[in-house]
Amino acid sequence: MAHTFTYPRDVKTVYYFGTCLVDMSFPQAGMAGIHLLRRAGVEVVFPQEQSCCGQPAYNSGFLEEAKAVARAQIKAFSRADWPIVVPSGSCAGMMRHHYPEMFANDPEYFDVRKFSERVFELGDFLHNALHVRYEDKGKPVKVTWHSSCHAMREMGATAAAKALIGQLSNVELVEIEREYECCGFGGTFSIKQPEISAAMVADKIEDIRATGASAILSGDCGCLMNIGGAMEHKGVPVAPRHLAEFIWERING
Amino acid sequence: MGSQHLDFTANVTEALADRQLRANFKSALTGLMKKRVAVLPDAAERERMRDDAEAAKRKALAKLPELLERLERKCTENGIIVHWAETTAEANEIILGIMRSHDATKLVKGKSMVSEEMHLNHFLETHGIEALETDLGEFIIQLNHEPPSHIIVPAVHKNRQQVGRIFADNLQGIPYTDVVEELNAIARKTLREKFRTGHVGLSGVNFAVAETGTLVLVENEGNGRMCTTVPPVHVAVMGLEKVVESLSDLPPLLRLLTASATGQLVTTYVNCITSPRKDGERDGPKEIHLVILDNGRSKMLADAQLRRTLQCIRCGTCLNHCPVYIRIGGHAYGSVYPGPIGKILTPQIDGLADKGVLATASSLCNACEEVCPVRIPIPGIIRRMRTEAYDEKGDGVVKGHGAKKNLLETLVWKGWELTYRIPALNRFVVSMLGRFGDKLPNVGPLKAWTSVRTAPRFAPKSLHQLAKEEGIRHE
């Protein structure tokens, strides 16, 4: 997978794709992303007709349903050719890499590829396209970081996220053992293979606990819902936080 | 065994409950991952090698029929007898025929996954022929009446204490020991006697070179070489995808095979077999047979996406890096090929009705694709297996196409599509979830989820609503 994207320069306006999970369960994380983009001096446009990238169906074997939903998104973001910023490495990976795969043999392939090339992961975009600088106003805290597999392997967004956290002077970032390993969410994988998924998230929690961090940060709400839900079930006192929400709070004191 | 019913869920439950098994896998595979990185330290060089290795395999697959013909011609010229088998049953009969023509009753075997695919040992046994595994790992698990748990390290799931117990229980006059040197000495002594008395030797083939008719065999222990040189007859078996065009295709493939499999720069032995013993030569078999097996492979070849499955060089590194394989081990897959490669290869060989479930055992984390030396897009082909399992229409080519189609899932995904395609419906569903989502009955998928997690919570106001209220531009 290509990790080196061409970032737009002198960005004035961006589209924001909120993702279905953020929309339903983590809207504050979604708003924090919008606030960070606006703070960086860009106008944010949030098309109300947007919904879901289509990944759940695509990964579950329902290709036609995934394509129908993907077409709806492409249409919702088609009035201008602004960059599309996504507060999720997984959904961004879907739109960037898998849309062209899905439409490889369709007449709209070329348009889909043009769309895909406009898709960026939020943390990556803030760091590599907008070159943001943050001043930390929070108390000293120790955190750890979890990359979603797709943020890491499809969007290459891990370094950018760590660089953003690194700008926060009172935040100590401790790396987690087996950082490269999946947390066991995998969308419908956690439903189709609940036992394997449970074993994976249990190990992930042990590794998180071993860092001694008080919060686990990630750029993906799917992983946070999985890890956070499992930690709460077990009574592990580590807070799951979306990167955007965490940064927004730190810089506002 | 291909038609045997696979109760994957039961296998998974059993494997996850075995703490010793999980500890063995975690420690062994973490070690293999580290060794791989240690011998491929330069990322740019590694990626270039992967490009070359992939190109060599893709080139070979693109002209496979032609290369196979050339291989047959060259091998025949060199004095190797070539046999073609469309099915595993045919391949087994061919080998039985060779054994019978020499009145042979003892087969000594080097490591061969294709022979596992053929269930050759069991077949020969029913015809009164003893098939003895001589690869150390295969030897250990054969003594314990188990199939391999890994493509490269078949006994990876056993620690030395368990191996000591297997030896003591199954070899006559051997006391228990867990000292590695002593275990090695016991195996060596036992196996030497087998090589000395074997009638026919069998091996796999890592690469068959069409240009020269060379069979290339990579190994560390020397047992493969014993099998191919000591008995008077050598039978090599290979899937038809093992052919490469020329000797110059080999360097990146050999380098990446050993680095990916065991984290070695080079293996102890790289055997290049070109002909049987010639007049005046002092060793080597008098007769060499090459059995080339199809078993569904030409069907994969015909499909541009599925064809890439055949790039596999059986290094097993996708197993080593798979978070699912690491936790459940090879036996849980109930199939010859476990792990990520097995999830795409097994349903194509055995059919989606029997083995389609294996494709669900992946979180699509892409770790396998990231390390595959020949860049097989395993997650993409896993998705293809899932799609074919549900799709009754379309141009499905995998056996059992549409086998998992059911009304409930079809309706669920149709409902999902409508919800996310029609904005008004989406607004309605999301607002209903915001209001009543915490009162959902704890059944089905939610029950599976909440067995180890708290239930997902739904926000009273969606991002759509919040963005609107904050006046975020929305056209």
Image: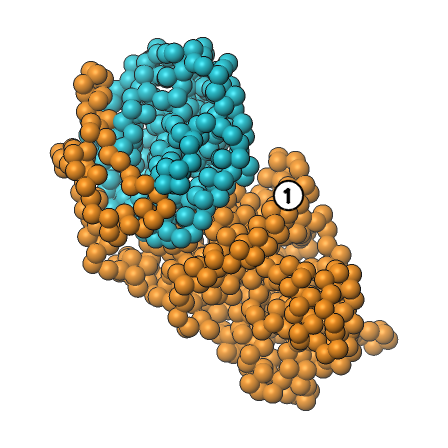
Residue at horizontal 68 percent and vertical 82 percent from the top: B106
Residue B262 picture location, percent across and down: 66, 52
User: Along the line of sight, which residue is nearer the eye, B468 or B156?
Assistant: B156
On screen, residue B232 above or below A102: below
Residue under numbered circle 1: B34
Can you tell which quarter of the image residue B217 is in?
Answer: bottom right
Looking at the picture, does residue A251 appear above or below residue B320?
above
- Chain for colour cyan: A
Task: Quadrant for residue A136, please give it.
Answer: top left
**Residue A75 in picture, x, y percent from top left:** 23, 31
Percent position of residue B471, x then y: 20, 15
Point 38% across, 44% down: residue: A186
The front one of B284 and B9 is B9
For residue B299, above or below residue A203? below
Instruction: Tell me if residue B432 can be seen.
Output: yes
Determine whether, in the image, residue B136 is placed left or right of residue B6: right
Residue shown at the point (55%, 85%) measured from the top left: B126
Give the amino acid type for the residue marked by disc 1 in the picture: Lys
What hue represents chain B? Answer: orange
Where is residue A110? Give x, y as percent: 33, 35
Q: Quadrant of the C terminus of chain B?
A: top left
Foreground of the two, A150 or A116: A150
Color encoding of the figure = by chain
Residue found at the very far front of the displayed protein: A235
Q: Chain of mark 1?
A: B
User: In this rendering, would A223 be left or right of B330?
Assistant: left
Q: Nearer the viewer, residue A243 or B300?
A: A243
